[in-house]
Amino acid sequence: MSKRILIAYFSHGGENLIDDQIVDLKGNGNTKVTAKALQEKLSARGINANLFEIEPLIPYPTSYQQTLARSKEEYENGSAPIIADGPNGFEAYDVIFLGYPNWWGTIPAPILSFLRDHNTEGKTIVPFVTHGGQIFLYSLETIEKEAPKAKFAKGFAVAAPYINAAPYVIEEWLKENEEVIQ
Ligand SMILES: Cc1cc2nc3c(=O)[nH]c(=O)nc-3n(C[C@H](O)[C@H](O)[C@H](O)COP(=O)(O)O)c2cc1C
């Protein structure tokens, strides 16, 4: 039987600093764009993957500065905000692509919440990050700590100023990691 694949991601999609400029991504955050590109690339290979957006019940403000302030507080306190329920049928997935922006060198707090709310035992987690230059930094060790019984595959990263390159990065990853999804 083919593997059941979920793409779960968090993306801010408000104001962000791209190449030293404040840009409003208007709901089309870099990680969301990457997650959708991944779904399309899998679909082109005849593989169906479900997309799930991890959303905190209290959304982050659009403002870059306010988002920095809230996320810094969450990072310093190690807090895990309440997130919306779902996806349905999480138990049935074999492979979880877990997408997030690098925030403060690690995973954003809603990803922490997601990992604590879901049992990832025996599932394969494929992390993917979008970032402003620091790539995964400390995020992988945090994910591994929060999902101690999951298996991990090598992930992929897309730099924020080169978000249009996401389909190429994904294609390269797919070529080298067929066994993860087959
Ligand atoms: C609150 C906040 C903290 C960030 N911290 C980092 C960081 O520590 N290292 C880094 O390389 N990029 C950092 N960035 C840049 C984001 O990782 C990058 O712009 C990402 O692509 C945003 O994805 P999104 O549009 O899906 O939210 C930060 C951005 C924000 C808003």
Image: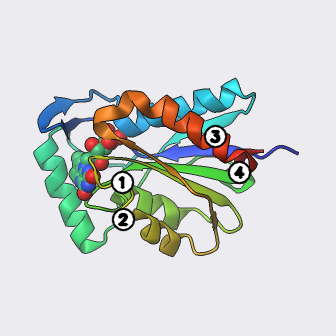
Q: CA distance from mark 3 to mark 2?
A: 32 Å
Q: Earlier in the sequence, mark 4 or mark 1?
A: 1
- Along the line of sight, which residue is nearer the eye, 67 or 172? 172
Q: CA distance from mark 1 to mark 3?
A: 19 Å
- Which residue position is annotated with label 1? 135
Give the residue type that dot 2 points to: Ala
- Marks 2 and 4: CB-CB under 8 Å? no
Q: Quadrant of residue 63?
A: top left
At 26% across and 47% down in the image, what residue appears? 132
Q: CA distance from mark 3 to mark 4?
A: 9 Å
SS for dot 3: helix
- Which residue position is annotated with label 2? 80
Q: CA distance from mark 2 to mark 4?
A: 29 Å
SS for dot 2: loop
Q: Is residue 79 left or right of residue 173?
A: left
Q: Residues within 10 Å of mark 4 (few under 14, many from 20)?
A: some
Q: Quadrant of residue 139?
A: bottom left
Q: Earlier in the sequence, mark 3 or mark 2?
A: 2
Q: Is residue 93 visible?
A: yes
SS for dot 1: loop
- Which residue position is annotated with label 3? 174
Q: Earlier in the sequence, mark 2 or mark 1?
A: 2
Q: Earlier in the sequence, mark 1 or mark 3?
A: 1
Give the residue type that dot 1 points to: Ile
Question: Could you tell me residue 168's position as x and y percent?
Answer: 51, 31
At 66% across and 37% down in the image, what residue appears? 49
- Which residue position is annotated with label 4? 180
